[in-house]
């Protein structure tokens, strides 16, 4: 029981992002700004290429921090509210809100030693 309590309070060392778009599901692991950059980059490039509306799913998984589940829900709400992806979607609003959500709790020091963006 104590081990579980200690684990629940442990600092977040890694996060698992699942970004699924049009049947593809790359997975990124990072605690740095690169994670947010990757998400925003994928969203931006797909929409700018004029691709038709397709299913986009972004999941943030973390065993330590319950707040990440709120962030995942926030991401889904932002995408739905702004009509992303699809014709007439508010791209600038979606990107700015997603960026705020994804980097909200990251500290500048993370970027200096956590540039580990991995695709699998």
Image: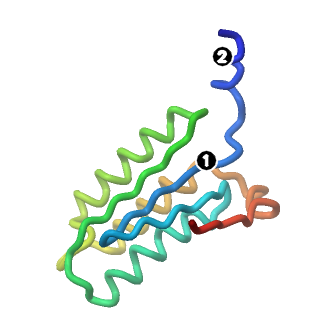
Vertical side of 62 occupied by 41: above or below: below
Tell which of 46 and 92 is nearer to you.
46
What percent of the width, then of the height, locates residue 30? 65, 58
What percent of the width, then of the height, locates residue 92? 36, 74
For the C terminus, the image quarter is bottom right
Q: At 43% from the left edge and 62% from the top edge, which residue is drawn?
A: 19
Secondary element at tag 1: loop
Depth check, mark 1 against mark 2: the one in front is 2
Q: Is residue 84 left or right of residue 32?
A: left
Q: Is residue 2 left or right of residue 45?
A: right
Query: Which residue is under mark 1?
Result: 105
Q: At 26% from the left edge and 85% from the top edge, which residue is drawn?
A: 51
Secondary element at tag 2: helix
- Can you name the residue that lies furthest to the top here? 1
Q: At 49% from the left edge and 67% from the top edge, which residue is drawn?
A: 26
What percent of the width, then of the height, locates residue 27? 52, 62
Vertical side of 7 occupied by 118: above or below: below
For the N terminus, the image quarter is top right
């Amino acid at each position: 029981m104590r081990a579980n309590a200690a684990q629940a309070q442990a600092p977040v060392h890694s996060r698992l992002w699942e970004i699924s778009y049009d049947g593809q599901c790359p997975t990124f692991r990072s605690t740095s700004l690169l994670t947010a950059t990757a998400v925003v980059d994928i969203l931006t490039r797909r929409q700018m290429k004029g691709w038709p509306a397709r299913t986009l799913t972004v999941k943030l998984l973390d065993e330590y921090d319950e707040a990440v589940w709120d962030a995942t829900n926030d991401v889904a709400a932002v995408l739905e509210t702004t009509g992303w992806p699809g014709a007439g979607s508010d791209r600038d609003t979606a990107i700015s809100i997603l960026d705020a959500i994804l980097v909200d709790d990251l500290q500048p020091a993370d970027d200096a030693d956590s540039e580990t963006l991995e695709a699998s």
